[in-house]
Image (spheres, rainbow, N blue to C red):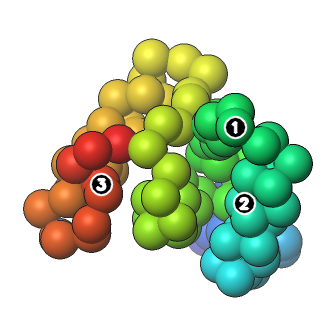
């Protein structure tokens, strides 16, 4: 039996994909700084729905926490539970602020 395209390519919810996202953590930090500047006294509350819009919460959330974000939104209960578990793991690994988020 010969392999199918899904055997050879990374698979997403939509099927096999050749796409690969490169996450620029410095860009996330810069974007947060700009948002905070524009927000003034208002809190900035990032939302990491849909696996941080496909970037992966395991890539994005640690950067958010490192920059002092203490509130993070999700769209669904399962996403909230995944975020809670990730924050607990990050806190256990010693990431400052993770336990307070």
Q: Can residue 92 be seen at all in this image of the molecule?
A: yes
Task: Identify the residue position indicated by label 2 in the image.
Answer: 32
Q: Is residue 23 visible?
A: no
At which x and y percent is residue 53? 74, 47
For this view, does 88 lie left or right of residue 17? left
Query: Could you say which is closer to the camera, residue 39 or residue 22?
Result: 39
Q: CA distance from mark 2 to mark 1?
A: 14 Å
Residue 49 point in image, percent of width and height = 64, 35
Q: Which mark is residue 26?
A: none
> How far separated are the C-alphas under marks 2 and 3?
17 Å
> Camera-side residue: 39 or 85?
39
| Tag in front: 2 or 1 | 1
Q: Disc 1 marks which residue?
A: 41
Quadrant that contains the N terminus: bottom right
The correct choice, above or below, for 13 with respect to 25 in the image is: above
Q: Which residue lies under the disc numbered 3?
A: 98
Q: Residue at x 35, y 29 (%)?
A: 81
Q: Secondary structure at mark 2?
A: helix
Q: Quadrant of residue 32?
A: bottom right
Residue 64 appears left or right of 19: left
**Sequence-first tag of 2 and 3:** 2
The first of marks 2 and 1 along the sequence is 2
């Amino acid at each position: 039996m010969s392999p199918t395209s899904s055997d050879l390519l990374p698979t997403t919810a939509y099927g096999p994909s050749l796409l690969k996202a490169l996450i620029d953590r410095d860009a996330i930090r810069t974007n947060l700084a700009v948002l905070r500047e524009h927000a003034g006294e208002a809190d900035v509350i990032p939302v990491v729905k849909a696996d941080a819009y496909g970037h992966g919460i395991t890539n994005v959330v640690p950067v958010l926490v490192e920059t002092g974000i203490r509130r993070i939104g999700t769209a669904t209960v399962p996403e909230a539970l995944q975020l809670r578990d990730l924050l607990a793991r990050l806190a256990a690994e010693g990431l400052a602020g993770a336990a307070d988020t």
